[in-house]
Every structure is written in C-alpha cells, then in structure tokens.
Image (spheres, coloured by chain):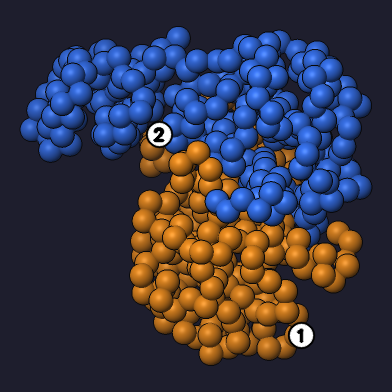
Chain colours: A orange, B blue
Amino acid sequence: MENYIYGKNNVIELLKDGSRSISKVILMKGQNNNAKIAQIINLARQRGIIFQFQPKEKFYQFGEISHQGVIAYTPPIKFTDFNEFINKKSEDNKYKKIIILDGIEDPHNFGSIIRTCVCAGFDAVIFPSRRNATVNSTVEKSSAGAVNRIDLIMVNSLTAIIDRLKDNDFWIIATDINAKDNYYDIDYCNMNFAIVLGAEKDGISTAILKKSDFKIKIPMLNNFNSLNVANAASIVIYEALKQTIQKTGNVV
Amino acid sequence: MENYIYGKNNVIELLKDGSRSISKVILMKGQNNNAKIAQIINLARQRGIIFQFQPKEKFYQFGEISHQGVIAYTPPIKFTDFNEFINKKSEDNKYKKIIILDGIEDPHNFGSIIRTCVCAGFDAVIFPSRRNATVNSTVEKSSAGAVNRIDLIMVNSLTAIIDRLKDNDFWIIATDINAKDNYYDIDYCNMNFAIVLGAEKDGISTAILKKSDFKIKIPMLNNFNSLNVANAASIVIYEALKQTIQKTGNVV
C-alpha cells in the first residue's frame, strides 16, 4: 500500500528533507495563488517530482484529515524479514538491541517509539501483524521519518519469534507493572536483548510474560499507574543507552 | 471556560472514574438504541449527573472532533497561583521538583508531560500564557486526568518567574541540544530544581538559557536529533526520580 503525507507544511518539509522518496504530489484545483502552493510546486520542480492539479472529488478518499488540498504519495515503508535481520546480526560483533511491541494501538505512540529507538541506536522494532497499529501515514509522521532508518519487522506470532530470539542468544526483558525489579536494576550491557512493551490498556500477554528472562517495572508515585506507553518506552530505552555509554566510555 | 470530554468510550471512562466532576452530559437525539448510550445514561443516573438529548445542530460547535454524539462537560481546570505555590513550599521540608515548559505547542505533548510529572511525583508544571498550548480538552485527555493532580501554574513571563524561583532557592536546569553535560551527569538530589523544556522546533529561548544554572542534553545517535519533547521530558524526569529513589533507599 502506498503511503501519503498531507498538509501544506508537512509536504514542504518532506520536499525539503530529500531523504525520503516521493512518487508524486497532488494539489487541489483552484489554489494557484497561494504562496505555499507556489513553494511546493517550486520544490517539486527542483527535485523532478511529478505534481498534478486534481479536482476536489479526488480528495474525498482521504476522509476528514486536514490535507489542505495537498497530498504527497510516498512509496510503502519497507519491512525487514526476521531471518534476514538475524543473519545480519551474526555478521558483525555488536550486541543488538530490539524493541518488541505487543499490541500498541495508537499510531502516534507507535511512531514515537520508533523515533526514540532510532535516537538511541536500537536495531529493530518487532510488532505483530494483528492487534497492533500498522505502519501508516500517521505512524510515519509521528516517527519524524524514523521509519526509514531502522529495521521494522512485522511477524505473525510474537511468541514464536521470542523463541527464535532466545535460540539466537537474545535475552527477553518484559515491562510489567507487577515486576519486583525496577527498570534500572538490570544490566543492559554485554548482551543481545529485546525489551517487550505491552498494549496501552492490557499490558503484555501472559504467554509472553512467561517466556521472559527478566521482568521490570517503572516506579510510579501518587497511585497514578498511568505512564503513556511511548514515554515508558523512552525511559527504559534511554536507561539502556546510558548504561552502554557509561560502561564503554563512548562520548556521544 | 468549561472543558469537555467527547466520544462514547471516553465519556464512559470518565463516568466510571469518579475522581473528576462532571457538569452535564449531552447526547445527540436519535441514538437511543445504542448499548453504549444506554450505559452512559445508566452511569449518569447512578452518579446523579444531568444528561440531555440535544439536536445534532447543538454539536456543530465542536467542529470536526469525533464526538460520536456524546459530550460530557467538566468544570474548568484549576490553576495554581505562583505565590501560593511558593508559600506552600516553605511550609514543608521536602525539596520541590518543577517542570517549566517554554512554548510547547502540541496539546498531546503538553498533556503527556503533565501525566509523566504526576507519575514521577513532581510538584508543578509552569507554562507561559502565550506561545504555549492552553489546557484544553485534548490536554486533559492526553494527561489521563493528571491535570487535576498537580499544580499547574500559568505565568505571563517565564524569565521573571525564573528569577523568582532563583530567589527562592531553586536551581534552573535547561535542556539544550548544545549542552556539554548529559542529563545523567547532574545530581538531582538535595535541591529544589526546575527543568526547562523548549518548544518542539526552536528549543529554549536564549534569555532563559542565560539564566540557567545547568545545561543538559540527551545524547542521540544516528545523526537523528529528533526526540519527541514529551519523550525527552520523560527521560530526564525519570532520571531525577531514579536518583532520588536510589539515594534515599525508598522503595516505590
């Protein structure tokens, strides 16, 4: 499925960015005199990208999003095959860091987690083909383009993949509100690991909890056990990065 | 200004929650046969909350939000006066932790930061009356109700307030992408502090940077300097909480 980016400012940023390929831009007829439309046309010309004026009926398919009469089509996000990822792993000597999402429904959270993973140098995000947001335009936008800079691995069965990861020398770390250990009690260095994050409401499924090597929680005060899942992800991901930086002495 | 919560599931959760008062619920005429509407009416009856069926024209004022014909009005969020907060401070002996937002435009980020502050036991969120999202229904929803569990302080001038904080024995910690120190190089214990977070695009204003006692950055890899501001906030906020827990030995 082809993705799209919508809205004048978003499309201008996309055209300026240059790192993401664009199939074509469509503009709603009758807005030639707008400065931003002129800028979009200019940028598209410079990059040799097709642009077309289309009647407003063409935009009905996008529903209620605020496209402002501007849509840029982008090629579908490329997923990585799990086996390909595992084989790539064995080619170099670095420990791998993975995030596994067990049913994240909100596309903003999904995109935001991918973004944090790229900032922190994680290697892949694994998510199930069902019960999870798909990688759509909202995810791409929330990720600030990060969807193209990390291995995204969509799988049919998380439990099967977790078995495969364990076979391949990965440790499985589950976030669980009932865990005894806090997230900073774990040593994230010197091992391949996958951190599992659960759905916004229900957390991680029991089958996956059972397969986990570590269970960790994020302490919460005020009887307010309600961290947003993308924020929770950032806290754990950065604890892992911090430990790596401190242990290896690498200055970032 | 009165706030409102919209959508069937959101209003059901609000009615079940009980911690937030509700002025009234309005329902769009003609949807009597819906199970969720029946549940909303039941819950409203149990709590003695007024509910009214209104014609669809009444809902036009809410624009394009997906209200699904259900709106619950809630009393306005109560703000705390800065002086009141400072005086309260001097009454007890605990160190205070504050977040200052310098122009956060996205209401989801604003709400999400408030939520993390409550989870981590922070005392207040200070934000300017201009150049910042106001506390509206989206903020309240993204905060998961946290807006009612922390001091929210709206001020006209952040620089003036920062001077007042310094006069009152607070240390000012600015997040700045060009800082030398990483966020975990600071000792957050044994002092009152305020962490300043900048706008999504522009960061913290120069005037505020100059007044800061510490500047910290979050290390980012892959040349991808693009953490979402709410995620960045969570990372720093939880480093401070973690240090406090580790130093005081309090188990949470």
Which residue lies at the image location 48% right of the left edge and 63% below the top edge? Answer: A179
> Between marks 2 and 1, how big is the CA–CA gap?
48 Å
Question: Which quadrant of the rendered structure holds the N terminus of chain B?
Answer: top left
Q: Amino acid at mark 2?
A: Glu
The reply to whether residue A91 is in sight is: yes
Q: Which subunit holds the residue at mark 1?
A: A
Q: Secondary structure at mark 1?
A: loop
Determine whether, in the image, residue A240 is placed left or right of residue B185: left
Which residue lies at the image location 52% right of the left edge and 78% below the top edge? Answer: A213
Res B85 quadrant in image: top right
Q: Position of residue A47 (x, y in %)?
A: 74, 49
Kindly report which numbered mark, 2 or 1, lies closer to the viewer in this rendering: 1
Residue pointed to by mark 2: A64
Q: Residues within 10 Å of mark 2 (few under 14, many from 20)?
A: few
Q: Position of residue B230 (x, y in %)?
A: 62, 41
B225 and A95: which is toward the camera: A95
Q: Amino acid at mark 1?
A: Asn
Q: Position of residue A156 (x, y in %)?
A: 39, 75
Residue pointed to by mark 1: A93
